[in-house]
Image (spheres, rainbow, N blue to C red):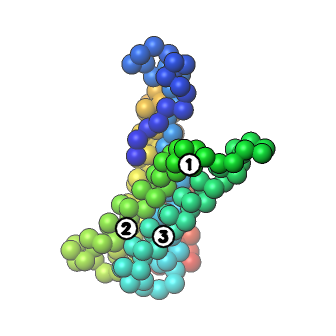
Amino acid sequence: MVSRPLVPPERAGHAGSSVGRRTDYSGAIYGSILAASVVATAGTTGEYPRLQLMLLLVVTGLVFWATHVYAHLAGERLVGQPWSWREIRRIGVHEWSIVEAAVLPAVAVAISPLLGLSVGAALWLALCVAVAQQVGWACLGAARAGASARLVIAEGVVNLTLGLVIVAAKVALKD
């Protein structure tokens, strides 16, 4: 997942400077929360076969990615103007991190048998990976945007809190 400046380079300050630049990790953060939610929800229905959980993570990521692409296209549409393939591709690439965020939790599930983990433990591993990457992307985005250490920590705490709400929901619904 790459930070993408949202401000054209000519308006982003002098060369090599981060002044006036923005980083966008929103898709990665959102996708991580989505992956955590999928894992937590799957865990409430009993033991899921690993392959089904991996497919559920990836397919859900793809569906939400397509939904975000469509929502951006529909929301940014100029009256009477058709969508161009260039615009569809631009938004699709920008939102792709939603899908990418499902990959590490799915990999965690895939390698769980190698670690000797039960399916239930694999769910917890995938959930921890999703929450950890959510916190990591939030902190990285803040740091790359030039935030102070205090703000980077605040970003991490906010995202950890959001992730822990999902963990608490999983525990409350069924461990």
Q: Residue at x 44, y 67 (%)?
A: 58
Which quadrant of the figure has residue 100? Answer: bottom left
- Answer yes or no: is residue 144 visible: yes
- Answer yes or no: is residue 171 visible: no
Percent of width and height locating residue 29: 50, 50
The residue under label 2 is: 106
Q: Give the residue at the far right of this rendering.
A: 79
Q: Residue at x 34, y 72 (%)?
A: 109
| Three-letter residue code for mark 2 | Ala
Between the residue at mark 2 and the residue at mark 3, the CA separation in whole angstroms equals: 11 Å
Percent of width and height locating residue 122: 34, 74
Between the residue at mark 2 and the residue at mark 1, the CA separation in whole angstroms equals: 30 Å
Q: Residue at x 52, y 80 (%)?
A: 44
Q: Disc number at residue 59?
A: 3
Percent of width and height locating residue 32: 47, 57
Which class describes the residues within 10 Å of circle 1: few (<14), some (14-19), or many (20+)?
A: few
Q: Is residue 42 above or below residue 128?
A: below
Mark 1 element type = helix
Between the residue at mark 3 and the residue at mark 1, the CA separation in whole angstroms equals: 23 Å
| Three-letter residue code for mark 1 | Trp
Which class describes the residues within 10 Å of circle 2: few (<14), some (14-19), or many (20+)?
A: many
Q: Is residue 117 above or below residue 70?
A: below
